[in-house]
Image (tube, rainbow, N blue to C red):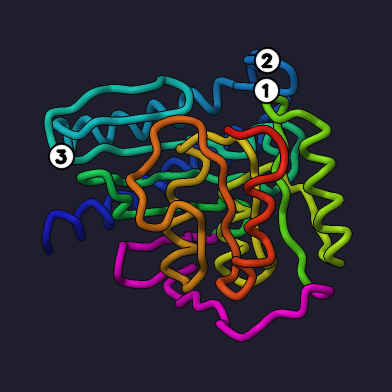
Amino acid sequence: MNALDQRHAHACQWAREAGALALDYFRQRDALTIDSKGVQDWVSEADRNVESLIRSRLAETYPDDGILGEEEGWQAGSSKGYWVIDPIDGTTNFLRGLPDWGVVIAYVEEGEVQIGVIYVPIQEQLYQAVRGRGAFCNDQPLRLSQEPIELSSVLIYMGFGRRTALPDYLARIDYLYQCQMDQRRLGSAALCLVRTAEGLVDGFFEAQINPWDVLAGLLIVEEAGGWHNYIGQPAATGTMRVLACAAPLQEALTPLLHIGQPL
């Protein structure tokens, strides 16, 4: 087993372990200590403790690797790789008792995402990909159709946060409406992306989002045969504007990237 294979195996193992801890907190969520990071932006002791668990595993096993996490920020390393983690993507769903949340782990080496792992504890679904080796859900391969898709049948997830101007968001909804495409909001970018990779929805867009929310999922979409607007670019470390979709919809959905204010 080479170094990348070892990291992949550990990422899957730690995502399950972190997911089990998060699920314990989920079942006792009424007792959690919750703080506000901003309007409709929450963090709980569950988020912090799950991230701490993943960081402790990384420190024990790969002490030279860097870490970028939602709750504790950037920790520099001396190796050529670093990890990007979101302990609970979909915190509001988690705190409300909704099932749409998950643990997210990505590994970046020399500027390129090499490993993406997303674990959804409620459904016991482990989504994972290694660059060049395909995407999987619980060991079942994910492969998107390359056949044309009728626009009037398209359904995509649209993310929205308060960093995005409401008129810009509504203008994008109007564009979809005029093209006879439909949209939903879910509250977890990671789950939006894996459901795109599964073909349950046809795409995902969000105008301003963080790398820990999407890097793992973008690799999973790409390895499932989908398209996203960061293909061939170095892994982002700052705010991103993300569009991912079934490849035949690239042309129809790309205007979403250019509506409204630039990033």
Residue 140 falls inside the magenta stretch:
yes
The C terminus is located in which quarter? Answer: top right
Q: Nearer the viewer, residue 167 or 93?
A: 167
Q: Determine whether 121 is above or below 53 in the image.
A: below
Q: Position of residue 32 (x, y in %)?
A: 65, 21
Q: Position of residue 191 (x, y in %)?
A: 61, 52
Does 163 sit above or below residue 223? above
Q: Which residue is labeled 1 in the image? A: 41
Give the residues in magenta: 125-153
Q: Give the secondary structure at mark 3.
A: loop
- Hey, what amino acid is under mark 3? Lys
Category of crowding for the residue at label 1, using alpha-carbon neighbours closer than 10 angstroms: few (below 14), some (14–19), many (at least 20): few
Image quadrant where residue 88 sits: top right
Q: Looking at the picture, how far across and down is residue 134, in whole percent?
A: 37, 72
| Marks 2/3: CA–CA distance | 34 Å
Amino acid marked by disc 2: Gly
Q: Point out residue 197 in the picture as x, y percentages from the top left corner.
A: 55, 66
Horizontal arrangement in the rendering, residue 112 relative to residue 200 (left or right): left
Report the residue marked by disc 2: 38
Q: Is residue 106 left or right of residue 24?
A: left
Q: Between disc 3 and disc 1, whose residue precedes?
A: 1
C-alpha gap between disc 3 and disc 1: 33 Å
Tell me, for residue 80, which label it has, or none: 3
**Residue at the image point whose x is 78% and y is 47% from the top:** 172
Residue found at x 19% / y 33%: 60
Does 195 appear in magenta?
Answer: no
Q: Residue at x 41, y 68 (%)?
A: 223
The amino acid marked with disc number 1 is Asp
Q: Secondary structure at mark 1?
A: strand
